[in-house]
Image: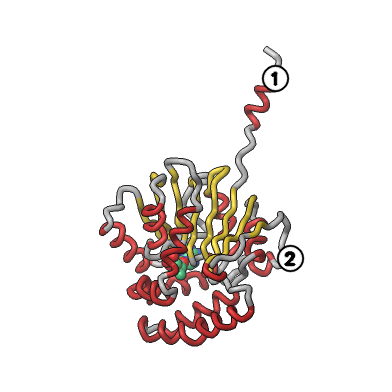
Amino acid sequence: MEAKSHTVPKKEPANISQISADESTAAQQRDNARMFDRIAHRYDFLNRLLSLRCDVTWRRRMAECLPSTKNLHILDVATGTADSLLSLVQHCDRIELGVGLDMAERMLRMGQAKLQEGGQCKKLSLVRADGVTMPFEGASFDAVTIAFGIRNFADTIGGLREFHRVLKPGGRLLVLEFSLPTNSFLRRCYLAYFRCVMPVIGRLLSGDAAAYRYLNRSVENFPYGSEFCELIVAVGFADVHAHPLTLGVATIYQGQKEPASDVSQLNTEGDGTD
Ligand SMILES: C[S@@+](CC[C@H](N)C(=O)[O-])C[C@H]1O[C@@H](n2cnc3c(N)ncnc32)[C@H](O)[C@@H]1O
């Protein structure tokens, strides 16, 4: 069952400065990448198990939200083991070129093996870099996607700004992220699973208790729904929507970079002189 999506008007959120970067973000970010490298060998298996395979459907839903134009050049930030990148290509035949970017080396190595296995190395490539300072020129991609990655950014706003920079005018941002059910009974049940069951399974199967304690804390502390939409609006995206999935335990956020107003055309069209 899926809740109704909602649109958020343009307005500056009050707490934007609290979420913006501070000096310790680079160190935080490196610790975070190391944590994902520690669990890389079990990451895909645990994702399927702990989400009861819902993540497969959520990733397919994200592919369905890609722009309807052909020859898409897409960037999947925080691509990890390239699960989302591969799912996007599998479910959208309009993708001409895809790049996956992540900071965690071992996650990327697992992803590279999957790309090779799937014979996708011509179309898809992986880059190791920080999503807040990406090695791409501005206006390079038709779509930027990020699945379960943005809440791990030490600098959320810095990341969103960078996604905006590398998108072409008219390009689309798609963020798939965990959220919490709005229904209070469901939220209590979900939090019990999240706080008590998930960390135990995660610890037993990955051998890393801290990583799976981090998972539930990071989800509970991260803004979701209209609060997260406000952040996307604040960095300059328009037409921002949230589409809650599976009783609200995950959400796809969508935003558009405004198309460039064609100033040169306006100038020549209005110019009657020889
Ligand atoms: C929960 S995993 C998600 C992986 C993948 N997108 C998926 O759907 O399975 C989060 C990923 O975000 C990456 N990450 C966190 N902060 C990042 C940053 N600032 N730049 C690039 N990658 C980052 C981590 O290294 C990790 O691989």
Eyeballing the image, is 86 above or below 195? Answer: above
Residue 267 at x, y = what percent?
A: 67, 25
Between the residue at mark 2 and the residue at mark 1, the CA separation in whole angstroms equals: 44 Å
**Horizontal side of residue 32 vs 93, given as left or right:** right
**Horizontal side of residue 182 vs 27, given as left or right:** right
Residue 181 found in image quarter: bottom right
Query: Callout 1: few (<14), some (14-19), or many (20+) C-alpha neighbours within 10 Å?
Result: few
Q: Residue at x 41, y 70 (%)?
A: 53
Q: Which quadrant of the figure contains the C terminus?
A: top right
Q: Residue at x 58, y 73 (%)?
A: 180
Q: Which residue is more in the foreground, 209 or 225?
A: 225
Residue 186 found in image quarter: bottom right
Callout 2–callout 1 Cβ contact below 8 Å: no
Eyeballing the image, is 112 above or below 66? Answer: below
Dot 1: element = loop
Which residue is disc 2 drawn over? 14
Q: Amino acid at mark 2?
A: Ala
Residue 251 at x, y = what percent?
A: 55, 65
Which residue is disc 1 drawn over? 271
CB at mark 2 closer than 8 A to ligand 1? no
Q: How is the image coloured?
A: secondary structure
Q: Which residue is more in the foreground, 106 or 72?
A: 72
Query: Callout 2: few (<14), some (14-19), or many (20+) C-alpha neighbours within 10 Å?
Result: few
CB at mark 1 closer than 8 A to ligand 1? no
Q: Amino acid at mark 1?
A: Asp
Residue 210 at x, y = what percent?
A: 46, 83
Dot 2: element = loop
Residue 162 at x, y = what percent?
A: 55, 55
